[in-house]
Amino acid sequence: MNINKVKLVNAEFIWTEPHSKRVKVKVSVQKEVYNGAILEQSYLVEYVQQDHMCESCSRVAANPDQWVAAVQLRQHVSHRRTFYYLEQLILRHGAAARAVRIKQMDHGIDFYFSNRSHGNKFVEFIGKVAPVKSRSDKQLVSHDSKS
């Protein structure tokens, strides 16, 4: 069916079960076939909804604890002004866009990344906007390889 040569006359939804992930549409089209004779025909079109996630999102959905790099921001003071300022800068510049998970802790925030380079880039960004002490380790301090 070439849509450029026919005229869409009517389209209506046909009821399907809400959870079936299918949409049925009855479409009526017209076309002039011979010396002003008009041919009208109806078709039933069925659309099927398929769920799809990007590769990194599907990896996280399969195992939400899968991360390679963790960046822990801590501040041991009575006020949270610096964290509020950092939060605004991170949101404005999209610095944590590649974070797999962000978790609020007692004295700070933990950012988890699927790539070590993404974590390093985030630490560099924080170092440009605020005074920081950073440490880069190959494995977690409390890492238990048997568990």
Image (tube, grey):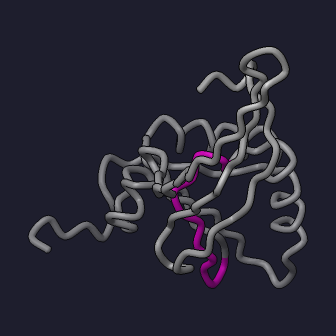
The percent position of residue 64, horizontal first and vertical second, equals: 39, 67
Q: Nearer the viewer, residue 42 or 88?
A: 42
The percent position of residue 15, horizontal first and vertical second, equals: 61, 75
Question: Which residue is pictured at 64% across the width and 57% down the height?
Answer: 25
Residue 98 counted in the magenta span: yes
Left or right of 90 on screen, residue 122: left
Q: Quadrant of the C terminus?
A: bottom left
Residue lying at the far left in this picture: please name it. Answer: 146
* Above/below status of 69 relative to 115: below
* Above/below status of 44 relative to 117: below
Please report the bounds of the magenta region as a residue range: 96-107
Question: Which residue is pictured at 60% across the width and 36% down the height?
Answer: 121
Q: Nearer the viewer, residue 29 or 141?
A: 29
Q: Quadrant of the N terminus?
A: top right
* Above/below status of 64 relative to 93: below
The percent position of residue 56, horizontal first and vertical second, equals: 44, 47
